[in-house]
Image (cartoon, rainbow, N blue to C red):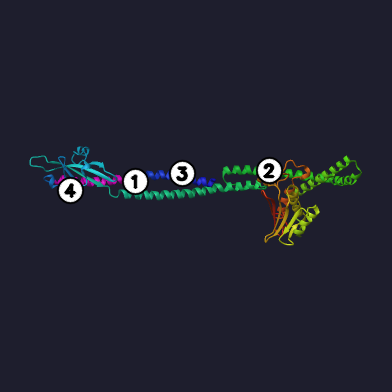
Amino acid sequence: MGIRGRAVLASVVIVLLVAGGTAVAVVTTVGSWVYSVARSQAQDQFLQEAKQIQQDRPFGPGRIIASPDMTIVVDGHITRLGSAKSADLTQDVRSANHTDLQVLRRTRGPYRILFGTQVTVNGPPGSDGVKVQLYSVRPLLGVHDKIVSVIKVVGICLAAGVLLGAAVAAWLSRYIVRPLRRIDDAAGRASDGDSTVRLQPQGTPELERLVESFNGLMDTHEHSLQQSRRFAADVSHELRTPLAALLPAGEVLQEESGEMSPDAREAAGLLNTEIQNLARLVEDLIEISRHDSRQAILALSDTDLVALTYDVLDHRGWRETVTVRSNRPEVVATIDRRRIELVIANLVGNAVTHGRPPITVELTAASDGVLLTVTNAGEQIPPEVQERLFDRFYKVATARTRTQGSGLGLALTLENVRAHHGTIEVRSDDSATTFRVELPWSAPTERD
């Protein structure tokens, strides 16, 4: 769960705890108040009826006029049975009820109260009167409905509070997460190689420090990267002059090797090969530096990619090894012929060198561009290696010698494809490895 989800969940839990506790307190308090009011009203009504009997002072208990639910007890005997039954009139209840108009109160089930009191009525002539105990079990009318109504209102308020809290938490978390997402996007772009990415001020002190640290880190990284690129460009240009002299010298040695001793012939061949490798490395470095400085200008022309592919295979002696397929006899696109030739040569060369037959180059003309795929039946490339295949100077096998490549071929391939506003990716499994290049029908005249 992300930060936003956790913030909303935490807010909902807090609102539930606070509002739930408040709701319980409100229901308990209001319920007690409603219960107390209803009980007092029932008690007042009972006492009023008892006072009326006391004031009337009828001659004898038999002449008492009372409500039908009134139970009358005289000298421990029930003379009239009302709502208070014999089981309600326990010994402790009767013994506690011995004072005129003093109300005895006992609970008898949910929302039912037993009331009792004593009154004095007229007795035989010359007596002080007869003590009569009055009992009645009265329901607390409306208490349950009122408490249920309170619970409903509190429940609605609680639900509204939870929804409001969740909405506020979602808004606040969005406010918090939005700059974090921008930072995450910037970090992702930086990890993809964009050294120019910077963050704008976020307006929050805590995030401001993070933004400053990130921008400072990217400034340092870009400065270091520029120095490295400048160094590589300077070194490669400085090497061009001595290489310009070494290349013809190596060719002369190779031509004269037939008159040399076997050891000298082998040394001359090795020297010429290494000079050629160094020359290719320098040219690759110069080409990379052009892309880095955004000086790689495309020389666009309408080119048949099918014919260009066959030219690459013929020039390098791969015609018998590689199969070419196309859904059209001609696939003409506006491209930089030299750079796309390098793309095809690098991809096919990798398949020939590191893969296994059958090797297939397939060109597919679509409505939005051209799809170029190079497939071989070599071993599967591990996912962690696929992520770094287009890195500069990266080699899959650490045991490869310098004659097997500088590690710049696929990096240059990526740059040349990007220069055409195209994309390149690799897919590899147990059965085959495929490089997919997608190119638009017409490359832009300027790089973005």
Tag 3 and tag 4, C-beta contact below 8 Å: no
Query: From this viewpoint, which residue is outermost toward the left?
Result: 125
Q: Nearer the viewer, residue 230 or 382?
A: 382
Residue 248: % across, % down = 87, 47
Residue with the mark numbered 1: 30
Instruction: Inspect this view and state whether residue 293 appears.
Output: no
Please tell me how crowded label 2 is: few (under 14), some (14-19), or many (20+) other residues with Cα within 10 Å: some
Q: Main secondary structure of the magenta part?
A: helix
Label 3 Cα crowd, 10 Å radius (few <14 / some 14-19 / many 20+):
some
Task: Quickly name the residue at label 3.
Answer: 14
Q: Which residue is mark 4?
A: 66
Which of pointers 3 and 4 lies earlier in the amino acid sequence?
A: 3
Distance from Cα at disc 1 to Cα at disc 4: 33 Å
Kindly give the residue lying farthest to the right in the view shown.
259
Q: Which residues are magenta?
A: 33-56
Kindly report which numbered mark, 3 or 2, lies closer to the viewer in this rendering. Answer: 3
In the rendered image, which quarter contains the C terminus? bottom right
> Could you say whether the residue bearing mark 1 is in a helix, strand or loop?
helix
Distance CA(mark 3)–CA(mark 1): 24 Å
Residues at marks 2 and 1 touching, judged by CB atoms closer than 8 Å: no
**Residue 123 image position (x, y, % from top left):** 10, 42
Q: Earlier in the sequence, mark 3 or mark 1?
A: 3
Q: Give whichever of discs 1 and 4 has the lower sequence position.
A: 1
The residue under label 2 is 221
Whichever of callouts 2 and 4 sits on the residue coming sooner in the sequence is 4
Crowd class of label 4 (few under 14; some 14 to 19; many from 20; radius 10 Å): some
Q: In the rendered structure, which amino acid carries the disc numbered 1? A: Val
Q: Judging from the image, what secondary structure is the residue with disc 2 in? A: helix
Gap between marks 2 and 1 measured at Cα: 67 Å
Identify the amino acid type marked 4: Ala
- What element does badge 3 sit on? helix
Return the disc, 2 or 1, that comes first in the chain's sequence.
Answer: 1
